[in-house]
Image (tube, rainbow, N blue to C red):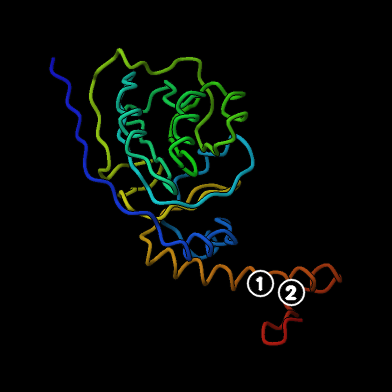
């Protein structure tokens, strides 16, 4: 059987001002108003983290480990590696070696809708990884099945396009086109600022129905 690797061109990094904007935005705030673009509640960080970057997408089947390292070879500073485990299996394609290689390329994080392995090593490396649990079964570069890089993928419960903006934190992962992400982030930051006043109001023992947004009290 002939393996097939589809390697498409990458997209440029996100604008630094968008990264700065996203640094103060929480996915849970976005979740108050948006209903699409969320990878899903089962994809969670290995350790508390907050990161934003441009999506470099990978469709990774079975035990083929080569496609992951082909993706790493294309990574640049500010990239978020988004991996779709197209077979939906329990095989980990992200471990300590992958995390170290991705970090060395300047990646800001990895999102995979499958398990990871080498948890302690990943934590020691310090690269944020969002995944669906842990597995001792892993990919191997000796298995050449095929895969695709920088193509539209289904990661968890959402479609992810290469070049989209990815925001990930302790609550989950959210994806949108860069222009749309900017609009959402600006609205979310305003909402978070209002939330400070709301929490002060509630901490005083007052009813939420008495809160006046116009005055912040």
Res 196 quadrant in image: bottom right
State the residue at coordinates (20%, 29%).
Answer: 5
**Tally of marks:** 2
State the residue at coordinates (63%, 68%).
Answer: 192
List x then y, in percent, for residue 60.
31, 29
Q: For the view shown, which residue lies furthest in the top direction? A: 142
**Residue linked to disc 1:** 193
List x then y, in percent, for residue 190.
59, 73
Q: CA distance from mark 1 to mark 2?
A: 7 Å
Mark 2 lies on a secondary structure that is: helix
In the rendered view, does 213 fall on the left or right side of 15?
Answer: right
Dot 2, crowdedness within 10 Å: few (<14), some or many (≥20)?
A: some
**Residue linked to disc 2:** 197
List x then y, in percent, for residue 106.
46, 42
User: Residue 136's mark?
Assistant: none
Q: Point out the image quarter for the N terminus.
A: top left
In the rendered view, does 38 fall on the left or right side of 213?
Answer: left
Q: Are discs 1 and 2 less than 8 Å apart at CB?
A: yes
List x then y, in percent, for residue 17.
48, 66
State the residue at coordinates (53%, 62%).
Answer: 20
Q: Nearer the viewer, residue 54 or 92?
A: 54
State the residue at coordinates (79%, 69%).
Answer: 202
Q: Nearer the viewer, residue 215 or 207?
A: 215
In the rendered view, does 207 fall on the left or right side of 174?
Answer: right
Up-down: is 145 above or below 154? above
In the rendered view, does 208 fall on the left or right side of 168?
Answer: right
Mark 1 lies on a secondary structure that is: helix
Res 150 quadrant in image: top left
Q: Point out the image quarter for the C terminus.
A: bottom right
Dot 1, crowdedness within 10 Å: few (<14), some or many (≥20)?
A: few
Q: Nearer the viewer, residue 76 or 91?
A: 76
């Amino acid at each position: 059987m002939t393996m097939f690797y589809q390697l498409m061109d990458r997209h440029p990094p996100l604008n630094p001002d968008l990264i700065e904007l996203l640094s103060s935005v929480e996915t849970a705030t976005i979740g108050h108003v948006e209903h699409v673009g969320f990878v899903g509640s089962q994809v969670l960080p290995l350790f508390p983290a907050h990161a934003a970057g441009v999506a470099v997408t990978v469709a990774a089947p079975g035990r083929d480990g080569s496609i992951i390292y082909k993706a790493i070879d294309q990574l640049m500073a500010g990239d978020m590696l988004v991996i779709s485990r197209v077979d939906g299996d329990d095989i980990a394609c992200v471990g300590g070696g992958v995390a170290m290689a991705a970090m060395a390329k300047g990646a800001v994080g990895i999102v995979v809708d499958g398990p990871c392995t080498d948890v302690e090593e990943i934590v020691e490396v310090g690269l944020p990884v969002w995944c669906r649990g842990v597995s001792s079964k892993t990919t191997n570069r000796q298995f050449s099945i095929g895969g695709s890089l920088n193509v539209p993928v289904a990661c968890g419960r959402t479609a992810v396009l290469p070049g989209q903006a990815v925001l990930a934190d302790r609550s989950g992962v959210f994806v949108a086109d860069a222009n749309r992400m900017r609009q959402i982030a600006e609205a979310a930051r305003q909402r978070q600022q209002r939330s400070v006043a709301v929490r002060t109001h509630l901490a005083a023992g007052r009813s939420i129905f008495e809160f006046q947004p116009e005055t912040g009290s």
